[in-house]
Every structure is written in structure tokens, then in C-alpha cells.
Image (tube, rainbow, N blue to C red):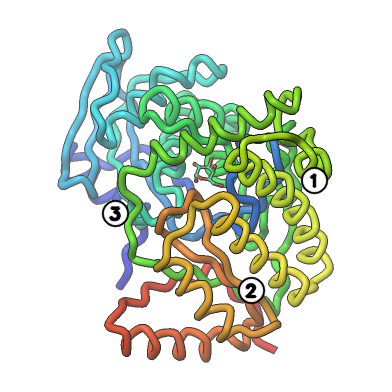
Amino acid sequence: MNISAREKAREAFVTHFGEEPQGVAFAPGRVNLIGDHVDYNDGLVLPMPLAQGTAVAWAPASQEVEAIARDASGETDSFRLSVIPGPDGSWRSYLRGMAAIMPEFGLPVPGMRLAIAGDLSRGTGLSSSASLEIALARAFAQAAGNKNPGAVAMAQAGQQTEHRYAGVQCGIMDQMASAAGISGHATLLDCRDLSVEHIALPEDWAVLIVQSNVTRGLVDGEYNLRRQQCETAAKALGLASLREAGSELVTQAALDPVVKRRARHVVEETDRTRQAAICLAAGDLSGFGAILNQSHASLRDLFEVSHPAVDSLVTDLQTLIGGRGGARMTGGGFGGAVVAVMESAALDPVIQALRQQRRAAALPCDAIIAWSGRAT
Ligand code: GLA
């Protein structure tokens, strides 16, 4: 039986601290349906929360934090809240970062004993680190008696933790998707004003995530470089961010060719996300799928964050699905996961055919069904 993250965290707490926790907080990972590399350009994104994520079992402690991470071989951390240590390149950086930064966003951090456990693998592009940050934020909020910590404040504290404690200059999509997402719905997030609209996934659609099994290593530098190139483009156009740019402005501007390709992707991807949200709300699967396929081509050719193994997996899925859906890389890129959307009725045959193809090529086929409504 698959034990849930919550149960694993509770068990780890009992084993390590010898008592029952007072509560267990949970936050999901996410898959992004469309809108990649636009969040840090104030654009529109459309992620959805997963059933998988990170759980934090907790009990109060006076003025100190004592933690155990079940999935990091039971490693521990402990510190007084008056002297929070700096990052150390491990899971502890997220705990220390959240404890240090949450008060800046009006979220109190009381002393706490805690056990962390999850059911998302790191480096697979499904936001295990954002789900850890938001689960910690929820646990601290519960321990402080704060019943309604705002999604935006938790997400901003998580994003700052990434910037200042993990060295990744990420946008805010992953943290907002984890903090504000509702199961069975996509989250249309406007990264300019952080407004959110929840769009229900149609009952006869399915969302499948397949791993490319290329692990994302040493890509933070590439990610930060893309962000710089986008900032260079906005500055050259005299704009606060690329969100303010239209396609024509970018096409006609005298920009360095690489910077121009990056900017074109960003401007067009935000338009695609807006269109995709309209197709989703209208249940237009063919329209939605076609936009997903275009997004992949743009991330591969203009933003150059894909990988040959990801491209061939996307092509295989697009071919199996046909016109009734689509597939694309999802998240930061350079490996990681692929997302595919199709009719619920097509899910089993597509998974079976993909498994066969990949087995014949001696490749694994790790698939997660993120959503499957009623097969008609
Ligand atoms: C990573 C970052 C996000 C976002 C995506 C790409 O997941 O954490 O902020 O930029 O890449 O869309």
C-alpha cells in the first residue's frame, strides 16, 4: 500500500520524538499546464496542484526548532530562533530560510519540533521544494494559531527562501500553485498582481505527467541566465517587464538575436496561456492541445530550455494523442517532466502504447495521472 506523505511524517515524528505530533500540515507539488518561464516576467501561468507533496508533522517547542527529514536518511537540524543558521546546500536551507523570512511577511514563527516527509522526487520538475516551503509555512502558522495564513504571504516567503537560501532566482508560480491551488482545478495566476482564478478541469479530460528520466542537475546557472536575458530585453525596450511588451514591439526591436528569441517566447507564451485558459473553461480540448504543442516548440527553439530526451518523449505523446489533446515539457526544463492532456477515455491506451514503445527502447516509463475525470 502507498502510505501518504502525511502518515509518513506522523510516523517519523513519533519514531524520532517519542510522542504524537499535535498536527500535520501538507502542501502539494504542482504541474504547470502552460506558461513556462513567464512568471518572472510578470506573465500569466496555468499550473495545477498534485495529490503528491510534502507533509510536516509538528508539536510546539519553546523558542527552538528541532527537525528531522525522513526522506533525507533521517538527517536532523536544530537551532534557536534567536540565532538561525545560514543555508548549507541541503533541505535544511529551506527550513532555515522559511524560519528567518516568514516574519518579514507578517507570519509569526514559533518554536516547533517537526518531521518532514514527502512523496515527490526531487529534480523531477514537480516543485518538491515549493511544496516543502509551503508545508513548513502551514505548520508554523498552525503552531502559531494562525488559522488563515494568506497564500500570497506564504508564497512570497517561499520565493525569497529560494532566492536567498537556495540561490535560485525563481519566479512565484510554484509557491503560489502550492499555496493557492484547489484540487481538480487549474490555477490561472497573473504574476503581475498575483490574482488567481480557479478553472475546473473538464470531467472528460485527463492530465498525464511522464518523466523524461533526465535529472535536472546544475541548471540553476542556466535558469538565472534566462532571467537575466529577459531583464536585458525589457530594459532595452524601456519597459518594467516583458509583460508590457507586445509581439510587434519585440519583432521590430533591434535586440541581440538570442535576447530577441527569449523575449519572443515570453510575449507569445503569455498570449498562449490566456488562450489556453479560455479553451479550458470552454472544454475545447483540441484548441487547448494545439496551444500546448506550440508552447513546447517555443520552449525548445526560442527559449532553448528543452532536452533531446524530452523532445522525443513529447513527440511520442503528441503522436499517440493525435488532435484530441497535446503535450509539452513542463517547468524549468533541461530534463524533468512532460505534461500531456487528452480525453479520459484515451488515457489507458496512451499509457499502454507509450510503455510498450519505451520498453522496446529500454527506457523507463514513470507516469503520474494528475487528473482523470469521467471516461465518456
Ligand atoms: C521553475 C521556477 C518557476 C518558473 C518555472 C518555469 O519551476 O521555480 O518560478 O519560472 O521554472 O516556468
- Foreground label between 3 and 1: 1
Residue 347 drawn above or below residue 130: below
Nearest the eye: 234 or 92: 234
Label 1: how many Cα within 10 Å (few below 14, some 14–19, many 20+) = some
Q: CA distance from mark 3 to mark 2?
A: 35 Å
* Residue 29 visible (yes or no): no
- What's the amino acid at mark 2? Gly
Residue pictured at 48% horizontal, 31% vertical: 169
Please identify the quarter of the rendering in which residue 162 is found: top left
Is 15 on the left or on the right of 309, as rendered?
Answer: left
- What's the amino acid at mark 3? Lys
Q: Earlier in the sequence, mark 1 or mark 2?
A: 1
Question: In what element is the residue under mark 3?
Answer: helix
Nearest the eye: 9 or 213: 213
Question: In what element is the residue under mark 1?
Answer: helix
User: Looking at the rendered structure, which numbered label has been put on residue 326?
Assistant: 2
The quadrant of the image that shows the C terminus is: bottom right
User: Looking at the rendered structure, which numbered label has been put on residue 8?
Assistant: 3
Is 281 on the left or on the right of 242, as rendered?
Answer: right
Q: CA distance from mark 3 to mark 1?
A: 49 Å
- What's the amino acid at mark 1? Ser
- Foreground label between 1 and 2: 1
Question: In what element is the residue under mark 2?
Answer: strand
Residue pictured at 63% horizontal, 78% vertical: 342
Outermost residue, top side: 82
Q: Position of residue 260 (x, y in %)?
A: 65, 41
Residue 339 drawn above or below residue 42: below
Q: Position of residue 344 (x, y in %)?
A: 62, 82
Residue pictured at 53% horizontal, 79% vertical: 317
Q: Which residue is mark 1?
A: 247
